[in-house]
Image (cartoon, rainbow, N blue to C red):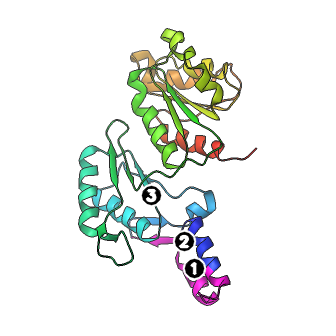
Amino acid sequence: MEQRELNELLAAVAAGEVAPDEAALRLRTAPFSDLGFAKVDHHRGIRQGVSEVVYGAGKTPDQIAAIIASMLDAGQERVLVTRLSAKAAEEVERLLAEGLAFADDESGDVPALPVFTYYDLPQLATVGEAPEPDGMGPVVVACGGTSDIYVAEEAAVTAEMMGNEVVRLYDVGVAGLHRLLAHADELAQARVVVAVAGMEGALPSVVGGLVSCPVIAVPTSVGYGASLGGVAALLAMLNSCASGVSVVNIDNGFGAGYQASLINHTTP
């Protein structure tokens, strides 16, 4: 159950259209669905402002499809699935199309499934359309090199699915600072910046010295041997001399996009 549905239920009770006992029953049974292999949390959107997101790695396509179906059946308008291979995504989409029938109107004459979109580079899928941006300002997602885009896109799509305007600045790393400085206006207007980098992980420190908003640093596993699979970038970001820089885990674009959305939806 999302906040909108809760408001509608309470309004129906106030209008005398739904009995209090029936409303209480809906609220008691709505918190989660037990699928045996997963307990799908339908109240997360009310508690946290963002509905549950599916982590695809380690789950079978049948499990992912069943979880998505449970969410949609409970009224969740959109679903984000992270760490999903292209092969698994194809199977999940097929299972959803075969097992679900949604109606575009009350007559039920036009069966339809919410739009299923797969993003190859960040390996994630979305079910349903992204909402209209309602954050306090733009979220800038910047990455050091083209090789870091797979993580940057995970952050960007996550933020968009959570109602944020996203500005992408890609391949603006410290090997050519003029490329970043050419986007000084976009950086100045940002409500929050997600800075993604591998190698030595210097980009967040540079960005942190240019902006007045929070900077979320994301180390990637991009780099040669001594980068230690992103550990070098992680340690560099944790030791940033720039104020206002926080750090998420290696390759965790989702965590950065989620945190950026929380910041962008916090009123001053």
- Name which of mark 2 and mark 3 comes first in the sequence: 2
Q: Quadrant of residue 189?
A: top right
Type of residue at label 3?
A: Arg
Q: Nearer the viewer, mark 3 or mark 1?
A: 3
Does 18 sit above or below residue 244?
below
Disc 1 + disc 2, Cβ < 8 Å: yes
Q: Position of residue 149 (x, y in %)?
A: 41, 29
How dense is the environment of label 1, judged by Cα within 10 Å: few (below 14), some, or many (20 and up)?
few
**Residue labelled with disc 3:** 78
Q: Is residue 11 left or right of residue 116?
A: right
Q: Quadrant of residue 121?
A: top left
Residue 28, numbered label = 1
Q: Residue at x 52, y 32 (%)?
A: 167
Residue 31, numbered label = 2
Given residues 115 and 36, the one toward you in this image is 115
Q: Residue 110 in magenta?
A: no
Q: Secondary structure at mark 1?
A: helix
Q: Secondary structure at mark 2?
A: loop
Q: Residue at x 55, y 81 (%)?
A: 26
Given residues 240 and 263, the one toward you in this image is 263
